[in-house]
Amino acid sequence: MPLNVRAAVVHGPNQPFVVEEVQLEGPRAGEVLVQVKTTGLCHSDLHAYEGKVPWQFPAILGHEAACVVVECGPGVTQFKVGDHIIPFLIPHCGKCAYCQSPKTNLCVEAFARLRPRESRFSLGGKPITQLWGLGTFAEYTVLPVDTIAKVRDDAPFDPICYIGCGATTGLGAALFAAKVERGSSVIVFGLGGIGLNVVQGARLAGAKTIIGIDTNPEKESIARRFGATEFVDPRKVEKLTSHLMKLTGGGADYTFECIGLPLVMRQAFECTNPAWGTSYVVGVAPSGSEVSAIPGNLMMGRHWTGCYMGGARLSRLPEIVDWYVDKKIDLDSLVTHRLKLEQIGEGFEMMKRGESIRSVVVL
Ligand SMILES: [Zn+2]
Ligand SMILES: [Zn+2]
């Protein structure tokens, strides 16, 4: 018998979120039924909602969550009822060339999950897709076991859902992708939730200079609290790149673009150390956009690269939850709003107006 569950359904791009009762099939082999306790509103959900990334509607969006296992499908032995879990956008099949390579955090399955799979949700017999195979804007959802991590059960559901995407994307960019070394210099462009997590990741790594850049002067105090040693408002500086080259004594060891603007990506690249500096693209740029560089700026050995989900693998999530519980990282200051399922639409409006860092739906 399918379960009747409340979910926020979107019937087409930019259509309102409708909280309604939908039908959820039980878990099949290799899947678990979970109760969603908290779920965060991420910019990627907004991109899907606005039709900026291809998706099929009607849909249940949401991919950042903290859940409890309530039923295991046939053959599931790694999880049991009552386990606290966090889903992750990158599954781990353990067998493919990606999973077996130390050079990446991806799994070949990660690409497939970006397209709609057969959904377990329906409404009046018609299927409703689960965004990227997850679909957490619902009281319950069914998830494949290769995409969830068991975490300690004494950690609060709010804010650890944030570790399922945003927090890990930022922390991991500094710690797992760039592997920032003690004493190095770091510049972070854009101090939203991702950028602030890059800042605290760089601080954990022991970076000596951490420069935060944002056009909103109100970001200075929180950036400094998270570990920034300098704050620069780019509108107050005549030549940003040369200013940053000077501040870092000849170019930063690592820079991170956390906005998604090609012009800023180029600035971030150009203010790295010409011989060994590495610039990471972390922000998601609009589809169809391009970046360019003067070839001479690459010639001396600069690196220009990017990372997906902070270069983190699923197996890293429990450790990041430990960091939160042990107060090595601050997530509480970043969860600025707590909402009901009915308020998801409002939450995305706040995100668009830049009023929230992270909004979390508490179910
Ligand atoms: Zn996300
Ligand atoms: Zn794999």
Image: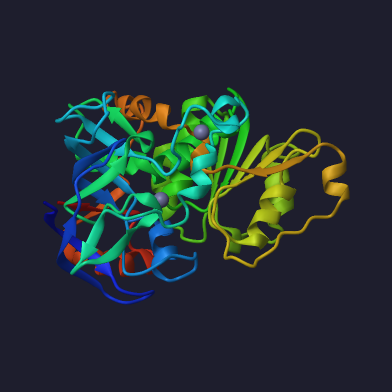
- Residue drawn 71% across the image and 47% down it: 271
Q: Nearer the viewer, residue 80 or 150?
A: 80
Location of residue 274 with respect to 50 vertically, above or below: above
Describe residue 154's horizontal placement relative to residue 147 as left or right. left
Using the rendered image of the protein, determine whether residue 228 is visible from the camera's viewpoint. no
Q: Quadrant of residue 71?
A: top left
Q: Nearer the viewer, residue 266 or 2?
A: 2
Q: Nearer the viewer, residue 247 or 53?
A: 53
Location of residue 217 in the rendering, given as x and y in whole percent from the top left corner: 46, 58
Describe residue 56's horizontal placement relative to residue 112 as left or right. left
Location of residue 162 in the rendering, given as x and y in whole percent from the top left corner: 33, 43
Describe residue 61's horizontal placement relative to residue 38 as left or right. right
Location of residue 101 in the rendering, given as x and y in whole percent from the top left corner: 60, 26
- Residue drawn 63% across the image and 29% down it: 103
Describe residue 100's horizontal placement relative to residue 345 as left or right. right
Location of residue 339 with respect to 255 vertically, above or below: below
- Residue drawn 52% across the image and 53% down it: 190
